[in-house]
Image (tube, grey):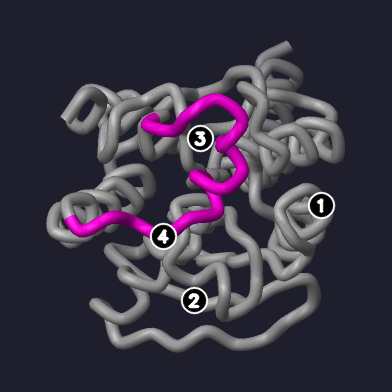
Amino acid sequence: MIKWIIKLFSSTQKEENIEDNVKPEVHEHQKNNLNSVSKKYLIVGLGNIGAEYVNTRHNIGFKVLDFLAKKEGLSFETVKLGALAEYKFKGRTFFLLKPNTYMNLSGKAVKYWMDKENIPLENILVITDDLNLSFGTIRIKPKGSDGGHNGLKNINLVLNTQNYTRYRFGISDQFKKGQQVDYVLGEWNAEEEAKLSERLETSAEIIKTFGTAGLENTMTTFNGK
């Protein structure tokens, strides 16, 4: 009887030792959860390509990314569906994308680079102009409608969701009836130009804060500033 008890105890200990050495199985859905904690971010500045659009209100997305790239000594490379610069900061990698598809097909470029770099939806930030906000006003939102903006409209359509972060830069609505297109595609006036540098500096900080401190902190820090 004693020998049987010793044998049983010895067998149980062996089984426990084997179990201690076995690595837990990671199922596919768990792998997906682990991969979702990404340190890669896609920052999309909306605009139109061409020298005639460089300094226009509608191209504020391009202007913000150009400012950050110049500040950090980055250069844009012509790639599929756009121009891309890679910015590394505090362990994060920011892909700065200026689509070359023209505004109303922006979603194609966003989807391509999102998939290519395996960047989750929550790590996408789209920078766009907004007529409904006074000049330089900052509005960062985790989701929302396109608000009549053709770039956002196409992104919503291609991604089949409105649940991505957008940074709306106010350009105001100081135009006469029937002159909206001319105003949006017009260049900054002298007063706006004088204030633009400070707003671009803040915009660069918004991008970095979005990647390092998260969306909630970014909205708390910058919205309405």
Residue at image coords 53%, 66% = 95
> Residue 123 appears at what percent x and percent y?
54, 43
**Label whose residue precedes the other's in the sequence (1 or 2):** 2
Read off the residue under disc 3. Answer: 166
| In-image side of 107 versus 188 (left or right) | right
| In-image side of 223 versus 93 (left or right) | left
Whether tag 2 and tag 3 are in contact, CB under 8 A, the answer is no
Residue at image coords 43%, 35% = 168
Q: CA distance from mark 1 to mark 2?
A: 22 Å
**Label whose residue precedes the other's in the sequence (1 or 3):** 1
Amino acid under disc 1 = Leu
Read off the residue under disc 2. Answer: 86
- Select label 2 or label 3 by which is in front: 3
- Select label 3 or label 4 by which is in front: 4
Q: CA distance from mark 3 to mark 4?
A: 23 Å
**Label whose residue precedes the other's in the sequence (4 or 2):** 2
- How packed mark 2 is, by other alpha carbons closer than 10 Å (few <14, some 14-19, many 20 or more), is some
Magenta region, residue range: 174-190
> Residue 218 appears at what percent x and percent y?
28, 33
Magenta span dominant secondary structure: loop
